[in-house]
Image: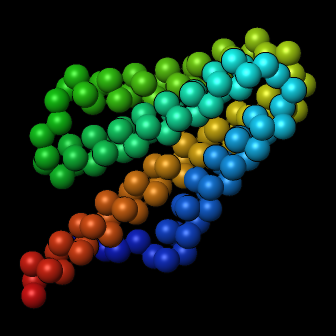
Amino acid sequence: MNQKPSNAFIAASWIALGAGMAGFLIGLWRAEMQLNEKGYYFTVLMFGLFSVISVQKSVRDKLEGIPVTEIYYGLSWFCTILAVVLLVVGLWNAAILPSEKGYYAFSFLLALFGAIAVQKNTRDAKTVTKSVSKDQ
């Protein structure tokens, strides 16, 4: 049975994505670091968001019986893990306060969670819409 996600969960997902991204990006904007460092963290954020959406899509496709190549599935997971590792390595070596490191880490993880949830909701809503139109 396909069920549309609740409006509350949809809103919470978008808020998590927005809060994570906005927090991370505002922190970068206000940070006293070189532009190349800011670019590194921005790229890691974008790479992480794209990779978790890929993981969510490929996992969901497999569950629904849609063919997914093992190389794409593995690459999606590898990229997700790599994005987290790149952030950890960057923060570990950064000359910023430990509180700032924690701020970036948790806003990054919140943004990744929000991206997964938004992708899931989008997919669920589309699946329910297709089911309803087939039934009519």
Q: In percent of the image, x 24 and y 67: which residue is there?
A: 127
Q: In percent of the image, x 18 and y 81: which residue is there?
A: 132
**Residue 29 locus on image (x, y percent):** 78, 37
Q: Looking at the figure, which quarter contains the N terminus? A: bottom left
Rendering colour mode: rainbow
Image: 6 above or below 47: below
Observer-nearest of 80 and 18: 18
Observer-nearest of 88 and 18: 18
Q: Residue furthest front?
A: 35
Q: In percent of the image, x 63 and y 21: which residue is there?
A: 40
Q: Looking at the figure, which quarter contains the C terminus? A: bottom left
Q: Residue furthest bottom?
A: 136
Image: 43 above or below 22: above
Q: Quadrant of residue 85?
A: top right
Q: Quadrant of residue 41?
A: top right
**Residue 67 locus on image (x, y percent):** 12, 40
Image: 35 above or below 2: above
- On screen, residue 96 versus residue 71, left or right, reads right
Q: In percent of the image, x 71 and y 41: which residue is there?
A: 24
Q: How many marks?
A: 0
**Residue 28 locus on image (x, y percent):** 76, 35
